[in-house]
Every structure is written in structure tokens, then in C-alpha cells.
Amino acid sequence: MKFWIVSKMYARRLCALCFVLACVSMWGCSSWFDEGTHFEWAEHRTEKSIVGFIDDSLVIAYNARNWYERTDEDGDQVGSGKGNQAVFIYNYRVQLDGPVFIDSLDNGMEENFNYGLGQLSDSVIWGGNVNHLTNDMGNVYSFWKIGKKPYKVNVKENKDGCSVGFNVRKLRTWLDGKIYAQGNKLTRGGDSCQYAILDTISKTLVYKRLDENLKWTEKCDDVRAWGDDVYCFMPGELPFEAVLLRNGVDTIDVPIKFSVGDFWGNILQPNANLCSLIDGKVVCSGVIWRGGLTFYENDEVVVNLE
């Protein structure tokens, strides 16, 4: 199954590409073909990046293959994009010869779309054209569940009690089956929007300011919901005094001291530690991940995915 986003301004270019690659005259591209440019695939795929964790032993990596549009006359680059995006599942606690699972798209050359921007839930990564304040391709999100193909949602934007939107940097599971969307920070003042709620059923993204019930999350490093509860990694007054809060009042004990925390699906990352929330308690695996493709335990490399 192929996934495409095609705006009017790219239709002529895409059809020209179809003509070049397939030479299928029945598509009617001959009258649109731009003889002044050609398309090239990059020689190698992009470097893998970690985009999520499934559980206390499996990690999701992502990469793609870049393509370039160049002029026929001098080879100058006039366009670029990504295609053939792929996800890889690795065991990050045991060094194996390769991934335990691979899936890739056969979507060819697709412009301005990234399927691997981050993690939504335990086995779903998200992507899309989310720099919608500066692009002209709409506000489109993709959701790629491991073992299935991604699907896209083209959403409409509304503002509820605020006026200035933001580019989405995080999506997190939220209350009532909704999705929580956040930009770079929650502390915007005035009438600037602080967060948004994405509803994939109504296909809307509603920007909001924090109300009295959520005002406590304003200083959170990261926030998400589990069931009816909202969890937040909150910085402390001093370094390595950060806390994990539930509903703004309950402090959940974390067995290590940390200064910043992130959520990766159901995995918690206080500092560089990989932990799980089991029966209301945080249990850390002993595995350290500082970014990149290397995992450590007891200060020794246990898995290298490069």
C-alpha cells in the first residue's frame, strides 16, 4: 500500500517523476514533464535514529532514503525529500546480529513528510507535516503501529481561548482517548496557546491555554495520561531533585535521582535511565541510554545498534 501527500504545486513535479521512472504514457504525464530537472536517490540510507521503546527490552529505530531533484544543466539541487521509510525493532539488552523485526514502505519519492518524528504509545510512532505555520501542505499527521502500515489524518485547526499557535514537537496519549500535543514549552504567556488536543475521530487539532485543572503541568518536562490519571516529570528547585507527579498532588517514588524526565510510550526516562511503571511503582532496568544507538549497563556497552 502506498501513501502520498500531493498538493497542487507538487502535482506537476510528481507526475513528471512518474513519467521518468515508469514511462507509462497512460498516466497522461507527457504534457507536464519538465525536461529541465531530474531526480536522484541518495547512495545510502539516512542514519538510524531511536524513535521509541516498546517495553523493557525492545527499541524502535527509524530511517529513510533521501532523494534530490537536480537541474539537468548543472546538477544544482532544487528540491529534496524522503522515501522508503523503514522501522527496525532491536533488543537493547542483548547484542544480536541484527533487528528482530523490519518493516518498510514502498512509497518511492515523497516530499516534506517524515513518518518518524516521535512515539505516541507503546507500539505507535507518529510523524507528519507538523511545521504547518510555515509550510503549505496542510496539517497532516501519520500514525505507524508496528506490524501495520501507517495511516494519515488531515486535521483542521481551531483555537479555544488563545490566539497564537505553535509547531507540534510532542504527541502523548491523553484523557478520553484524545492525544495531547505540545510545542517546545508550556510557559507561553499572554494569549499564546500552550498545548493542543488532537482528536483523530473529528480530525481536529484544538489549541488551548492551561485551565485551573492543568495549570500545575506548566513546568513539566513531559506529560501524558495513563487511564484517568495525568503524569508529569517536574523539575525540582535544585539539580537532581526532579519528581514524577500524578494529578499534581501525588509524588511517585523514582529509585534514582534525576534532573529531567521524558516519556517514551510506556517507558520512562529519568535522565538516561530506562524504567517502567509497574503497579504504580517505577522500576528501572539498569540500562542507560544517552541518545544515539548505544546502550550501557554498569558503565559498559551492552548493545550497539550501529
Image (cartoon, grey):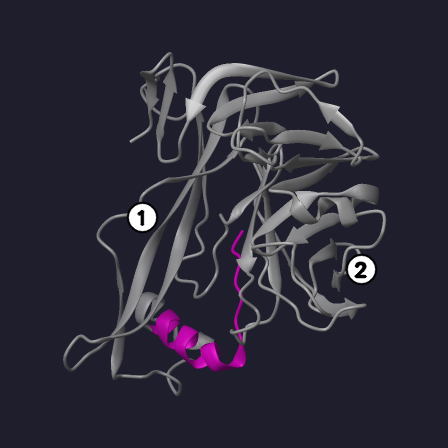
* Quarter of the view holding residue 68: bottom left
In primary-sequence order, the first of circles 2 and 1 is 1
Image-based side of 29 in relation to 217, left or right: left
**Front position in the image: 236 or 147:** 236
**Front position in the image: 110 or 235:** 235
In the rendered view, tell whether residue 296 sits above or below residue 133: above
Q: Main secondary structure of the magenta part?
A: helix
In the rendered view, tell whether residue 72 sits above or below residue 56: below
Residues packed near mark 1 inside 10 Å, few (<14), some (14 to 19) or many (20 plus): some
* Callout 2 secondary element: loop
Residue lying at 74% horizontally and 55% vertically, measured from the top left: 197
**Front position in the image: 49 or 108:** 49
Residue tagged by mark 1? 46
Q: Which residues are magenta?
A: 1-19
Q: What residue type is disc 1 on?
A: Thr
* Quarter of the view holding residue 94: top left
Q: Is residue 100 visible?
A: no
The label number, if any, that marks residue 202 in the structure image: 2
Q: What residue type is disc 2 on?
A: Ser
Image position, residue 46 (x, y; %)? 31, 48
